Image: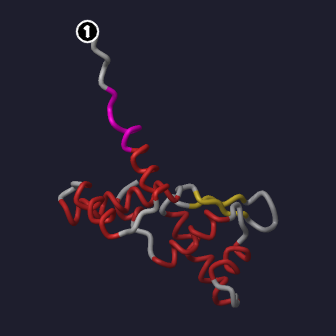
Amino acid sequence: MDQDHDNVTEAELAVLQALWQRQPATIRQITEAVYPAATDAKYATVQKLLERLAEKGHVTRDRSQHAHLFSATTSRDALVGRRLRAMAEELTGGMMAPLLSHLLRAETLTVDERRELRDLIDELEPRKPQTRR
């Protein structure tokens, strides 16, 4: 997916978040999730946002029923990862360590979150072959 397709507007992100919480979903269901005071104008807005997201490859439409059903084809993790990578490229020349260091220092992590991070680092670290003595 190229960079233009990764560029998701705030409104498009709100639609994706609604789909990540409940999918597949109709335009009406998505509209009600994104705009609690749903109007015909808001319905049309969500319809246009879904069209854009489909063009970018983030959403699919199932036309087999009267009310079309939409599903996100891009996971939250995948989108977050691509956007963080792009931000790291822009701000730090592609180096993730400064970005991660800042995030870790800026946020107060719980004991469970710190353990989860350690486990992830251990999991991602290449295993060294065992040497015999």
Q: Which residues are magenta?
A: 121-127
Instruction: Reply above or below: 13 against 96.
Output: below
23, above or below 18, in the image: above
Counting from the top left corner in percent of width and height, residue 73 is at: 57, 55
- Residue 48's image quarter? bottom right
Is residue 123 or residue 110 the one in the foreground? 110
Which amino acid, by three-letter code, is at mark 1?
Answer: Arg
Residue 123 on the magenta segment: yes
Q: Dividing the image into 4 quarters, which one contains the C terminus?
A: top left
Residue at 67% in and 79% down: 31
Task: Give the percent coordinates (x, y) of residue 65.
Answer: 80, 61
> Mark 1 = which residue?
133
Residue at image point 73% right, 69% down = 26
Left or right: 27 in relation to 76: right
Q: Is residue 71 magenta?
A: no
Nearest the eye: 107 or 13: 107
Report x, y in % for residue 49.
55, 75
Q: Position of residue 12 (x, y in %)?
A: 51, 73
Q: How many marks?
A: 1
Image check: 25 left or right of 13? right
Extreme right residue here? 66
Report which quarter residue 68 is drawn in. bottom right
SS for dot 1: loop
Extreme-top residue of the structure: 133
**Mark 1 surroundings within 10 Å by alpha-carbon count, few (fewer than 14), some (14 through 19), many (20 or more):** few
Q: Residue furthest left?
A: 93
